[in-house]
Amino acid sequence: MSSTGTGIQPTPSVLEAAPSPVKASAFLGRRLPSLELALLIAALIAPLFLRDYITVYATRVLILCLFALSFDLVWGYAGILSLGQSLFFGMAGYAVALLSRDFGVGSIFAVLPVGTLVGFVAALLLAGFLLLGRHPSSVVFVSLGTMTGAYAADRLARGSQYLGGQNGIPSIQPMTIGAHELNEGPGFYYLVLAILVLIYLLSRFLVRSQFGLALAGLRENEQRIAFFGYKAQHLKAIIFAISGAIAGTAGSLYAFHEGFVWTNMLGVVMSTQVVLYVLFGGSGTLIGAVIGTAIVEGLSFWLSDNYRDIWPIILGVLLLLVILFRPLGLISLVLGERERVGYFGPSLKGRRNAAS
Amino acid sequence: MDTLLIASFEILSFGAIVVLVVLGLGIIASMMGIFNFAQGEFVLLGAYFTYLVHSVGLPVPFGILAAPVAVGALGFVLEKLVVRRFYAAPIVAMLGTYALGLIIRESVRGLTGGLYLSVPEPISGSISIGSLHFATWRGVIVTITLLVMAASHALLAYTSFGLRVRASLENPSLARAAGISTSMIYSATFAFGAALAGLAGALIVPVFSLFADLGIRFLIQGFVAVMVGGVGSFAGPVAGASLIGTFSAWLPWLMSPVIADVLVFVLAIIFIKLRPQGLISGRGVNR
């Protein structure tokens, strides 16, 4: 950085002022990775200290984190307000539940790919209808369309005898890895954690790539990105399908973890839940989605025992306060704007070396 | 022939209910550019208020008259406190009003204990024309809907208040320069929309009985109706609501209710995709 001062003659005051922001940004620059690492370590050692039933609850929270990631990718990074994200989550859940019920398939190597594929294909089809076309779709239309999709799926599943109607599909067999049966508890917890970390890293790579930069541009000003020659609608459809795939993975894990699927997984209740998580933690940062899920679910676990009746009201009030006073979510208390936006493309080190 | 007449009366009365619910939503969406996700909960509040008045022992018609005033006042306060912060960002407004709706809905759920509560029809019985019987209360709903529609249109099209509302919609800064307090107009418009929802809730509670998810039931329907009709005008949402209401009431006569319910929405979404500006494009209030 010192090399920048050589060409021009800066006034002494600038020279004095220059080092401190550099230091500050270098310090801030480490906050996001250290936050992520701290959370990962906490998640790794948590089951050692938690009682079994809390570990089971924590597993569910991790699965919901995965689901929240999928919504964060479309809303936080591409500005598509998908109010029907549960459609992919629930469809994948129902698909693997049927696989288990009708064909007796419970192997993880069949279940996860099928769930992911179902989510991906459903999202791709819906994106093809809602996002592609001659006229660019308005945000309100897309949110309405996705919400209607979730509502329709919920209604159809409720009315369908084959899908178990109101009661859903109960008693799914345990998931198996080879001959090993995977039951609720630490084993399942670490499996989900591994999948979450893997998908988190993949998403992190995705949103920090050139593709992620184009997405961020879409979110900020779609028209300008279109004028630059990007096919804005195609980019949106791609990220929508990817997020559907992630939601599908989460849904199939959820179905096997809970041991049953029911219509709420498909419907508007679940999709608004995920909006809550992400807004709470901070959309536009992947870690924000994870933190928001953990906080909302943690609070609800803690409060719903004693304050079951007023917990949803508290949740609503908290959400309203966050939207009003912290539109970037709780994560903005820790992360500066600069780091929240982050860098894109290949790492800056190469460029820095070339410059100096 | 008789069943046909009875069926068309059923369809008409359900259509009227949807129009009544959508009218407030449409006015707020068209005049202020805000999609109010709490609108369904304003309907719920109107219904709950009527129930409260009834349970205290006062006559139901009094509750029906008082509900729009109470809900309108609440809408006014909420606009002043919360909603006005969202005007710059309509998408955030959707999420913010959703949070508001969540608070109202869960409060009512807590207050009613999650039960289905019924309110008797203030005017019971039926009107007989020849061998046909029509429920009187549904007739009253249709009549009131027509009156409210005409009155709202007159208010927006012919009064000086309506002129100010339209001016604020058309060009806020010019309206302010002309001495119109746009923030006051926005509060009043939002309160008016809320009051219409409150009236709708009060009128339909004898038909549907009171439960916490009453509002949700109409929310998606309302939004789809506004989009089908076209945002920005007075006539658009009304036309959309009549269409959606008619289809929602008519299709269950032809096929299973579940399929009909879904089909209406899917058709509506396809229609909006093909014609994004809605049935009636254009802005403002036609005179």
Image (tube, coloured by chain):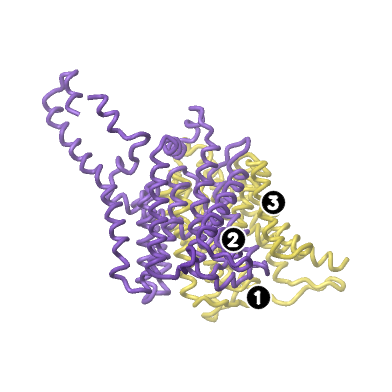
Residue B39 visible at all = no
Quick check: A342 left or right of B38? left
Closer to us: A177 or A42: A177
- Chain letter for mark 3: B
Q: Which chain comes out yellow in the rendered image?
A: B
Q: CA distance from mark 1 to mark 2?
A: 46 Å
Q: Amino acid at mark 2?
A: Ala
What's the residue at 20%, 24% (across, down)? A4
Q: CA distance from mark 3 to mark 2?
A: 26 Å
- Residue B106 percent across, percent down from the top left: 47, 68
What's the residue at 43%, 43% (across, down)? A77
Q: Quadrant of the N terminus of chain A?
A: top left
Q: Which chain comes out purple in the rendered image?
A: A
Do the numbered discs 1 and 2 sit on residues whose CB atoms are within 8 Å? no
Q: Secondary structure at mark 1?
A: loop
- Chain letter for mark 1: B
- Residue B214 percent across, percent down from the top left: 57, 67
Mark carried by residue B121: 1
- Chain letter for mark 2: A
Quarter where residue B262 is shown: bottom right
Q: Nearer the viewer, mark 1 or mark 3?
A: 3
Mark carried by residue A95: 2
Q: Amino acid at mark 3?
A: Leu
Which residue carries the number 3 mark?
Answer: B267
